[in-house]
Image (cartoon, helix red, strand yellow):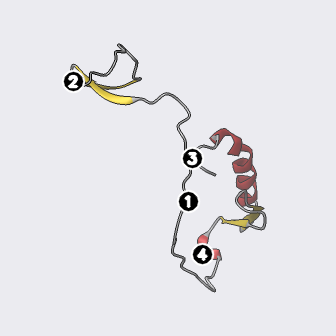
């Protein structure tokens, strides 16, 4: 689940998980949406598991690729109230040469 996901799409999954939990299942395993070979394990009681191995990973690099997709907004303080404003062209004139 990511921040941009629609949370209502997970309601059926939550209902199913509650059913398993209320019927004495220890947890559920399900396919991950991130990566083709991954699985997630959701335990209903962490005390039912025993740690066998643990690995710590350090992120070495992240590539971020972005582009502007809409008109930019900026913050403006008007009469003590901050609001977001879209810039607009109010006047076009030739550059003055020195």
Any mark on residue 47, and which? 4
Q: Measuring from the top left, give residue 81's x and y in whole percent.
A: 26, 24
Tell me which numbered mark, 2 or 4, is placed earlier along the sequence. 4
Q: Residue at x 49, y 27 (%)?
A: 71
The mark closer to the camera, 1 or 4, is 1
Q: Secondary structure at mark 3?
A: loop
**C-alpha separation, residue under disc 4 versus residue under disc 3:** 29 Å
Vertical relation: 98 (above or below) 92? below
Residue ID for mark 1: 63
Tell me which numbered mark, 2 or 3, is placed earlier along the sequence. 3
Residue ID for mark 2: 80
Q: Residue at x 64, y 40 (%)?
A: 6
Residue ID for mark 3: 3
Q: Measuring from the top left, give residue 50's x and y in whole percent.
A: 63, 82
**C-alpha separation, residue under disc 1 versus residue under disc 4:** 38 Å
Q: Is residue 59 left or right of residue 13?
A: left
Q: Secondary structure at mark 1?
A: loop
């Amino acid at each position: 689940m990511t921040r941009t996901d629609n949370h209502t799409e997970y309601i059926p999954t939550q209902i199913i998980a509650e059913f398993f939990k209320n019927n004495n299942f220890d947890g559920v395993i399900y396919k991950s949406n991130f990566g083709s070979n991954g699985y997630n394990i959701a335990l209903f009681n962490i005390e039912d598991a025993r740690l066998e191995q643990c690995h710590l990973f350090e992120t070495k690099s992240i590539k971020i690729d972005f582009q502007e997709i809409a008109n930019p907004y900026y913050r403006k303080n008007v009469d003590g109230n901050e609001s977001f404003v879209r810039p607009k062209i109010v006047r076009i004139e030739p550059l003055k040469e020195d």
